[in-house]
Image: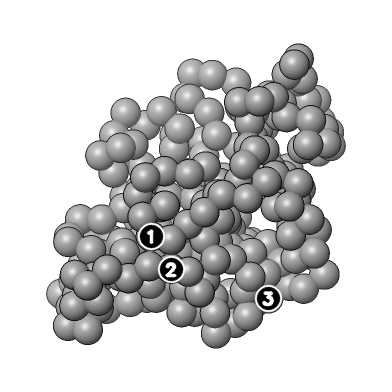
Amino acid sequence: MYIRSIDKYSHTFPNPNTAHETGILCYGGDLNPNRVIKAYLSGIFPWYNENDPILWWSPNPRCILELDEFKISKSLRKTIEKEIYEIKFNADFENVIKNCQNAPRNSDKTWLNDEMINCYIKLHKMGFAHSFESYLDGKLVGGGYGINIGDIFCGESMFSLENDASKVALHALVKRLKKNDFNFIDCQIPSEHILSLGAKTIPRNEFLIHVQNSLNNPKEF
């Protein structure tokens, strides 16, 4: 299937159901925050290597984490019960995303580049992007960030500098989202790590229906 380009001056995207089998829907445009939010509201997200054009994705299947299906291992439960980490939300978004950039799996900065970071910092200031954070002795040691659309939290990336720090922060995020009547966390593309925490895949068309329904059911983060 031909992968289309999009106009830099238009925020219109192709139908996400027409994405290539790899999940790529189109390429080009820019990371104007308004365009990026329009993408998320359509079930689309940007993900690309630093020296490549911006790629916009709508994978099939889509990976999600139902809030009631989050798996807490025995070791993680012990860490949570010890209350080693102090949990905060939106206290230091910029440092969270920069730590995500420098996480071992992202150390080559292939996708979470400075352009992406600047975009999500702007989205945070606009009230769309949020961070969840773990602190040890006052130092940020784990957490992640994502985008809030309707009643869905679109998870982007996490990092951990101490044992279970990101998982404890994720557990706190799940509790917060449940309390505020969110539906699920969008995990985008499945990985062994996120599947081990209870995530699953659903057909793209089903996910897109959830996205459209979420817009009529907005929740406060």
State which quarter of the image contains the N terminus: top right
Q: Is residue 192 left or right of residue 51?
A: left
Is tag 1's residue or tag 2's residue first in the polypeptide sequence?
A: 2
Residue at mark 2: 70
Question: Image point 39% across, 75% down: which residue?
Answer: 172
Question: Image point 64% across, 38% down: which residue?
Answer: 60
Is tag 1's residue or tag 3's residue first in the polypeptide sequence?
A: 1
Q: Secondary structure at mark 2?
A: loop
Q: Secondary structure at mark 1?
A: loop
How far is mark 1 from mark 3, CA to CA? Answer: 24 Å
Is tag 2's residue or tag 3's residue first in the polypeptide sequence?
A: 2
The crowding category of the residue bearing disc 1, from other C-alpha atoms within 10 Å (few below 14, some 14 to 19, many at least 20), is some
Label annotation for residue 7: none
Residue at mark 3: 219
Q: Is residue 119 above or below residue 198?
A: above
| Residue type at the position of mark 3 | Lys
Quarter-wise, where is residue 35 in the image?
Answer: top right
Q: Is residue 185 visible?
A: yes
Quarter-wise, where is residue 4 in the image?
Answer: top right
Question: Image point 22% across, 84% down: which residue?
Answer: 81
Residue at mark 1: 197
Q: Between residue 69 and residue 9, name the one nearer to us.
A: 69
- Expressed as whole percent of the image width and height from the top left, the position of residue 131 reads 45, 64
Report the coloring of the rendering: one colour
- Expressed as whole percent of the image width and height from the top left, the position of residue 179 reads 55, 85
